[in-house]
Image (spheres, helix red, strand yellow):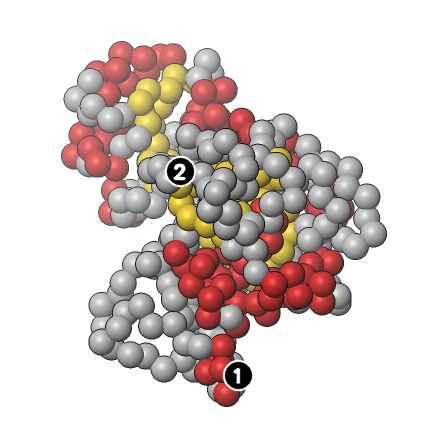
């Protein structure tokens, strides 16, 4: 089970029973003191170029700029980065030294006159790629751009429905806020092409911050730390949706890419509500998704991929369980009541709702730290 009670809330722990979930009365009797996830400034995307060749450094800087990645020049071997800190590119002038650091050699690059030397070194480092400029400009830009898109710490979950009105947006919002309560920096993203905005179900008084309208008028790369600082937060869960009374005009593909790339670096958990399957930009969105889940009701034909059944449980028409079946998200009267009040997150005070979300096992486990 991924989580049951939330750290930072005054919930009594019972060591002998790991399935203990505090009752609703317990929560009402104690003052809720949430541990707010710190909004740390996201690290800038940096790759390393091991070279002292001025012409090569200038060429790589231009390529990296187009890929929204910063190049760090490493002039001496003692300044090499630790493994796992981004791609390491070796210039032809220092390529022979790469043989002593095979685990830190992703690309060996130079110009056409360096051709033979580059391939000779690469033949002795199996994982190394070769980029001969200027013909490899486009490839190197795509390589760095793809690394930039997939980098970042966030676990990205998407939810799409096979039919409208089954409760997909409600479930997405609750999973995102459950992530916040379990110590994650969570962002709920409304990518439903037919959305009218999530605020009416979340709160009657939306917090200040940017929405899709502002992002659509922005240009260039999105800085992760700026995204973290400017999005609206409701009970410490970041929300990106359309403003109340705004007309949803859709979001272009490039903005989706920039948004998801920045969000992966600034948050721990992204929950993306994509509306009805398949999303028009599914091919782009799936590049960022770690787990894609479909929702349906009891009367639908079960999909072969990961899915959750939403709504009241109908034993007569119940969908047969399979390995792709993740569980049942119950349509409870208390959820209907908080939706009518515009206070959806408050329903997570309910033991039954928390347990229901936990049993779906969609939240990532946080790595245990030694004490």
Asked whether residue 74 appears in the rendered view, the answer is yes
Residue beneath disc 2: 320
* Residue in the picture at 61% in, 36% down: 163
- Residue 357 screen position, x and y as percent: 45, 58
Upstream in sequence: badge 2 or badge 1:
1
Frontmost residue, 117 versus 351: 351
- Say which residue appears at 66% left-offset and 65% top-offset: 337
Residue 340 x, y percent position in the rendering: 71, 63
Residue at 53% over, 83% down = 28
- Marks 2/1: CA–CA distance: 38 Å
Q: Secondary structure at mark 2?
A: loop
Residue 257: quarter of image: top right
Q: Is residue 270 visible?
A: no
Q: Which image quarter holds the N terminus?
A: bottom left
User: What residue is pinned by disc 1?
Assistant: 28
Q: Nearer the viewer, mark 2 or mark 1?
A: 2
Which quadrant holds residue 66? top right
235 left or right of 115?
right
Residue 217 vertical placement versus 130 (above, below): below
User: Pointer 2: residues within 10 angstroms few (<14), some, or many (20+)?
Assistant: few
Instruction: State if disc 1 and disc 2 touch (CB < 8 Å).
Output: no
Look at the picture and state if 293 lies above or below 21.
Answer: above
Compared to residue 6, the image places residue 120 above or below, namely above
In the foreground, 164 or 278: 164
**Residue 112 percent coordinates (x, y):** 38, 12
Q: Secondary structure at mark 1?
A: helix
Please tell me which residue lies in front, 212 or 73: 212
């Amino acid at each position: 089970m991924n989580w049951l009670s939330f750290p930072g809330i005054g919930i009594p722990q019972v060591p002998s029973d790991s399935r203990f979930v505090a009752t609703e009365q317990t929560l009402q009797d104690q003052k809720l003191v949430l541990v707010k996830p710190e909004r740390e400034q996201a690290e800038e995307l940096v790759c390393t170029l091991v070279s002292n060749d001025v012409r090569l450094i200038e060429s790589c800087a231009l390529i990296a700029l187009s890929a929204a990645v910063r190049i760090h020049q490493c002039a001496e071997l003692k300044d090499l980065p630790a493994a796992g800190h981004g791609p390491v590119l070796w210039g032809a002038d220092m390529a022979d030294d790469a043989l002593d650091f095979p685990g830190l050699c992703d690309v060996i690059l130079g110009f056409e006159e360096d051709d033979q030397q580059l391939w000779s070194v690469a033949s002795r480092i199996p994982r190394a790629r070769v980029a001969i400029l200027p013909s490899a400009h486009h490839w190197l830009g795509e390589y760095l751009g793809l690394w930039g898109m997939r980098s970042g710490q966030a676990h990205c979950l998407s939810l799409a429905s096979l039919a409208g009105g089954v409760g997909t947006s409600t479930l997405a919002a609750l999973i995102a806020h459950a992530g916040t309560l379990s110590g994650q920096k969570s962002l709920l993203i409304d990518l439903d092409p037919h959305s009218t905005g999530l605020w009416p179900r979340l709160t009657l008084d939306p917090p200040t911050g940017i929405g899709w309208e502002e992002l659509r008028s922005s240009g260039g790369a999105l800085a992760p730390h700026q995204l973290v600082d400017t999005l609206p937060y409701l009970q410490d869960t970041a929300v990106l949706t359309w403003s109340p009374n705004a007309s949803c005009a859709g979001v272009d593909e490039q903005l989706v890419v920039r948004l998801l790339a920045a969000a992966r670096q600034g948050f721990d958990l992204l929950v993306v509500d994509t509306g009805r399957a398949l999303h028009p930009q599914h091919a782009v969105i799936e590049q960022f998704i770690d787990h894609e889940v479909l929702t349906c009701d009891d009367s639908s034909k079960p999909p072969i991929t990961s899915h959750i059944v939403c709504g009241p449980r109908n034993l007569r028409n119940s969908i047969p369980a399979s390995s792709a079946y993740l569980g049942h998200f119950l349509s409870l009267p208390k959820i209907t009541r908080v939706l009518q009040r515009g206070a959806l997150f408050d329903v997570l005070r309910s033991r039954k709702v928390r347990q229901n979300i936990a049993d779906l096992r969609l939240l990532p486990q946080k790595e245990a730290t030694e004490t």
